[in-house]
Amino acid sequence: MVSEWVTVTIDEIKANRRNSIAMGPFGSRIKTDNFVSQGVPVIRGTNLNAGRLREEDYVFLTEDKANELRAANAFPCDIVITHRGTLGQVGIIPRNSKFPRYVVSQSQ
């Protein structure tokens, strides 16, 4: 029941590791030219729907590019929140997600 939910801050539930709260890469660090047919998926607003991650319609980056953007990497059980554009888009990466890691776009 909703009445049993406990209100906490993001700071109280974040992981105790570097970049546990992070934004997607700034501006031109991800360009259309960086997209490849397979690799590490990029989570965009279109992948967030009703608190869930839609595991379809991804664009992908190479492993090297994802490593370069490691501060913007997200993993299973991470919460992804949109901070600009269509606000209110939130999703959690499922424990049994299709990929072992993701890169969040600049709007997440």
Image (spheres, rainbow, N blue to C red):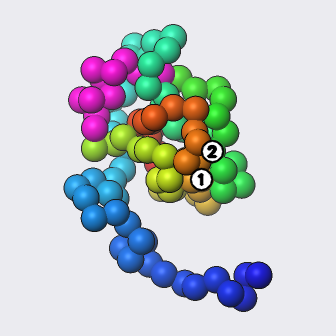
Query: Going 44% across and 78% down the picture, which residue do you hit?
Result: 9
Query: Badge 1 local density, few (<14 within 10 Å), some, or many (20+)?
Result: many
- Say if mark 2 contacts mark 1, CB within 8 Å: yes
Disc 1 marks which residue? 91
53 sits to left or right of 107 = right
Residue placed at 61% from the left, 60% from the top? Answer: 88
> 91 or 28: which is nearer to us?
91
Q: Quadrant of the N terminus?
A: bottom right
Label 2 CA crowd tier, 10 Å (few <14, some 14–19, many 20+): many
Question: As shown in the figure, which amino acid type bears the numbered disc 2?
Answer: Leu
Location of mark 2 (residue): 53
Q: Residue furthest bottom?
A: 3
Q: Which residues are magenta?
A: 60-70
Q: Amino acid at mark 1?
A: Gly
- Left or right, 67 with respect to 102, comes to left
Please report the residue visible at 58 percent of the width from the left and 85 percent of the height from the top.
6
